[in-house]
Image (cartoon, rainbow, N blue to C red):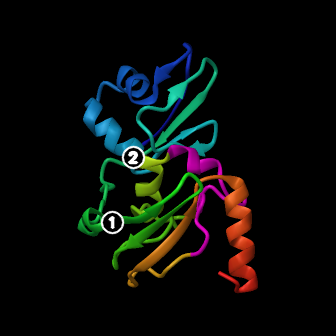
Amino acid sequence: MKRKFVCNENKIRLDQFLTNNLSKFSRSKIQKIIESGFVYVNREIIKSKHFSLLEGDVVVMDYKEDETINIPDEVKDIKIIQETSDYLIIEKPAGVLTHRVEGRKEYSLLDWILEKYPKIKKVGDNDKLRSGIIHRLDKKVSGLIVVAKNQKMFDFLKKQFKDRTA
């Protein structure tokens, strides 16, 4: 079901707005749909139920009732190894994608990161599928992932990885 709405008020939470406009779904179901990446605001995926809409924002929910929201059990094992104001080092468990793959609606490490650090969404190479991610590991591989929390650190770390000095 693809539904399109235009917000007619300022500073209403995304989950509240959709609940008000879609009586078919409970608020908790709407929140799960948002967190799973089925909701776009102004053509950008929004995964935070707390996202604040502004008047005129275009909201699209592209969700089929039979689609399942798959959050792997391995997500419970994600640990932050080190955190500074500029970066995170996270232990990625095997079985979890590092970031979303276009065309697949599968929960990823980046989904987990953006729930906890939504500002990282704006960090990176203008690729919202990989916000802040400096490098990746295959789904079946566990290991450490470096995530930049700001653009300056992203550029610095990307250069280190490219030059093989990291």
Q: Can you tell which of label 2 and label 1 is closer to the viewer?
A: 1
Q: Horizontal and vertical percent for residue 2?
A: 48, 41
Q: Which residues are magenta?
A: 118-135
Residue visible at 52% across and 56% down? 84
Q: Quadrant of residue 20?
A: top left
Is residue 109 among what the camera can see? yes
Q: Horizontal and vertical percent for residue 71?
A: 30, 60
Q: Nearer the viewer, residue 89 or 117?
A: 89
Q: Nearer the viewer, residue 140 or 146?
A: 146
Residue visible at 43% across and 32% down? 50
Q: Nearer the viewer, residue 132 or 82?
A: 82
Q: Is residue 88 magenta?
A: no
In which quadrant is the C terminus drawn?
Answer: bottom right
Q: Which mark is residue 162?
A: none
Q: Is residue 130 magenta?
A: yes
Judged from the image, the secondary structure of the residue bearing numbered disc 1 is loop
Using the image, determine if residue 30 lies above or below residue 81. above
Local crowd at mark 2 within 10 Å, few (<14), some, or many (≥20)?
A: many
Which residue in the protein does label 1 denote? 78
Q: Horizontal and vertical percent for residue 164?
A: 70, 86
Residue visible at 39% across and 61% down? 107
Using the image, determine if residue 67 lies above or below residue 137. above
Whichever of labels 2 and 1 marks the residue nearer the N terminus, that label is: 2
Left or right: residue 121 compared with residue 125 = left
Which residue in the protein does label 2 denote? 35
Left or right: residue 134 compared with residue 109 = right
| Residue type, numbered disc 2 | Glu
Q: Horizontal and vertical percent for residue 15?
A: 39, 30
Magenta region's main secondary structure?
loop
